[in-house]
Amino acid sequence: MTFLAHLPQRGVISLTGADRVGFLNGLVSNDVALAAPGRAVWAALLTPQGRYLCDFFIYASADSLLLETPREALAGLLTRLKRFKLRAAAELADVSEHFHIYAGWGGGAPAAQVIAPDPRLPEAGFRALSETPLATNATAADYAAHRIALGLPDGPPDLEVEKTLLLEAGFDELHGIAWDKGCYMGQELTARTKYRGLVKRRLIPVLCGAQPPPPGTPILADGVEAGTLGSHAGQMALAMLRVDALGKTLLAGSTPLHPKPPDWLRLPE
């Protein structure tokens, strides 16, 4: 059975002009040239120091790129991209009002103007942008439960602006980084983190022993702070945790946490 959920918390930026691919490719973590009709790319914009600013799905048509991102991050992303445009033949605009954004999973995809498999995991399903409303049979909360169980972040609070490293959040395993595409903003630290094995924290699904406390709640491991709680759905949540704390007793407030690392996650031996 196919589940389809409307995601009103997401927005869309259009990028047009002859230099659109090269311009964006020099800024973000993944290879923008891989985006094509029916094929999306997941990428992030970083600070020069390699810290997370924003992530988005990139869709391509014959004459434009579309960037799907959280609405709360849209204005800031648009401002940052315009700042880097300089003389590039590229035009940016917020076109959120023209699209309804959906996530689907569990079966085949409906017809829509823009549709592509979620590039992170086959189990994640697909993304769709439609100029007209589509019939849904699931809610944004249902989709949150689906993605959290898979260990997939959805911007803040799962990813901390100007703090999170991409490898902490699974961008390597989830196909959000092109290691062979050349330079982009924050590339040096991202590469150094990978090749020196410097990842000490990971974003991991956790089963909560009770209703999860609010995002941002500190997590203690045997009484010592070891991470923070992210988004949650039901009794599942995402948590940014120190890897060396995974075998310890974890508490968020008075709520016990039980890590449930997904199969795709590569942890140190």
Image: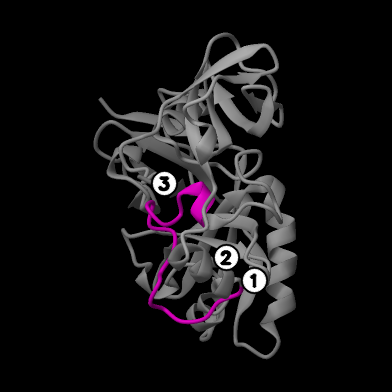
Label annotation for residue 92: 1
Label annotation for residue 14: 2
Residue 176, magenta (yes or no): yes
Quadrant location, the N terminus: top left
Residue 8, image quadrant:
top right
Residue lying furthest bottom: 87
What is the x, y in percent for residue 143?
46, 29
Quadrant location, the C terminus: top left
Height in image: 49 above or below 156? below
Q: Earlier in the sequence, mark 1 or mark 2?
A: 2
What is the x, y in percent for residue 220?
66, 25
Residue extent of the magenta highlight: 167-185
Q: Earlier in the sequence, mark 3 or mark 2?
A: 2
Q: Which residue is mark 3?
A: 128
Residue type (three-letter) at the residue carrying disc 3: Ala
Q: Residues within 10 Å of mark 2 (few under 14, many from 20)?
A: many
Residue type (three-letter) at the residue carrying disc 2: Ser
Q: Residue at x 71, y 32 (%)?
A: 216
